[in-house]
Image: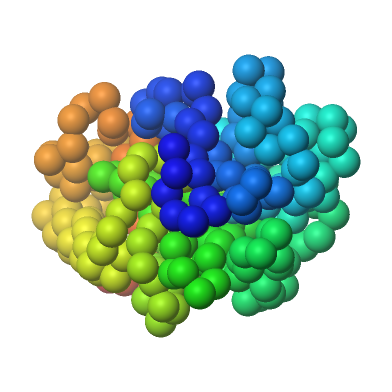
Amino acid sequence: MSIAPGVARLLAPNASMMTGPGTNTWLLGDPPVAVLDPGPDIPAHVEAILAAAPRLETIFVTHTHRDHSPAAATLKARCGARVVGRPAPRDGLQDERFVPDAIPARDEVFAAGRLRLRAIDTPGHASNHVCWLLEGDGLLFTGDHILEGVTPVILVPDGDLAAYLEALERLRRYPLRAIAPGHGRLIEDPVGEIDRVIAHRLAREAKVLAALAAHGPATLDELLAPVYADVPADRHALARMTLEAQLIKLEREGRAARDGGAWRGC
Ligand SMILES: [Zn+2]
């Protein structure tokens, strides 16, 4: 599916609760010479990438969760393309085969044919997360930093909610036209969407503080129901992870404390 001049989307066949309709793999250049987030190492998906981009030169990744980068190693072995991204953190949740040939510096610009991509640091969902901005166009490839319709899970200890919010604020300052997320459809109102995500996170933080005041000292599990009363129960296991990240952020800010497994407000 064509998204912009020289940008096409290939949907990986890995739909699930975590990945929504599947991972968006982006083909860059006309004809395509780069792929961004090659996705899971599923043979049919790798073949589809190689068929669409027989002259593949560069593989960009946003981060190394297993739904975004594992096809990179296979593609590199098949066609010798160079891999651009940050090394995988060691939290047991990453694509351990990921070995970058180039590690982008902050705001470094890379060429993909006639297109140019700027690496923007966006830690938070994952500590090695990079969003890629299509220079001169304003299309921002956000991986799991900004998604369509949902906010990403923040998994501690690699994930960091304060860093996530700081990165969102910083993204607002770039000339953005649209967001191409790692899962879901194109988002046409990038700054509005960033502001909605920030407002959502701050509203959730207010609920955490209210729950600590009403129920604290309380365990993570005891806080889950009052903080996420609006979220279906089948998503509470994911919500619990972000709640932990939220409490750790408040602890660092001196607004919450824990004694053993019990959290209280300060
Ligand atoms: Zn991810």
Quarter of the view holding residue 257: bottom left
Who's the residue at 62% across and 53% down the image?
Answer: 29
Who's the residue at 68% across and 74% down the image?
Answer: 108
Who's the residue at 41% across and 23% down the image?
Answer: 16
Who is closer to the viewer here, 258 or 109? 109
Q: Is residue 108 left or right of residue 150?
A: right
Q: Is residue 134 left or right of residue 245?
A: right
Residue 42: give x, y in percent of width and height.
64, 21
Instruction: Say if 7 sits above or below 133 in the image.
Output: above
Who is closer to the viewer here, 65 or 134? 134
- Count of residue discs: 0
Who is closer to the viewer here, 91 or 143? 143
Residue 251: give x, y in percent of width and height.
40, 66
- The structure's colour scheme is rainbow
Who's the residue at 77% across and 62% down the image?
Answer: 103
- Looking at the image, the residue that sits furthest to the bottom is 173
Q: Is residue 238 left or right of residue 224?
A: right
- Looking at the image, the residue that sits furthest to the top is 44
Can residue 170 be seen in the rendering of this structure?
no
Point out the image quarter for the N terminus. Answer: top left
Quarter of the view holding residue 112: bottom right
Residue 109: give x, y in percent of width and height.
67, 73
Residue 27: give x, y in percent of width and height.
59, 45
Instruction: Say if 44 sits above or below 32 in the image.
Output: above
Point out the image quarter for the C terminus. Answer: bottom left
Can residue 143 be seen in the rendering of this structure?
yes
Who is closer to the viewer here, 118 or 40? 118
Instruction: Say if 198 sits above or below 11 in the image.
Output: below
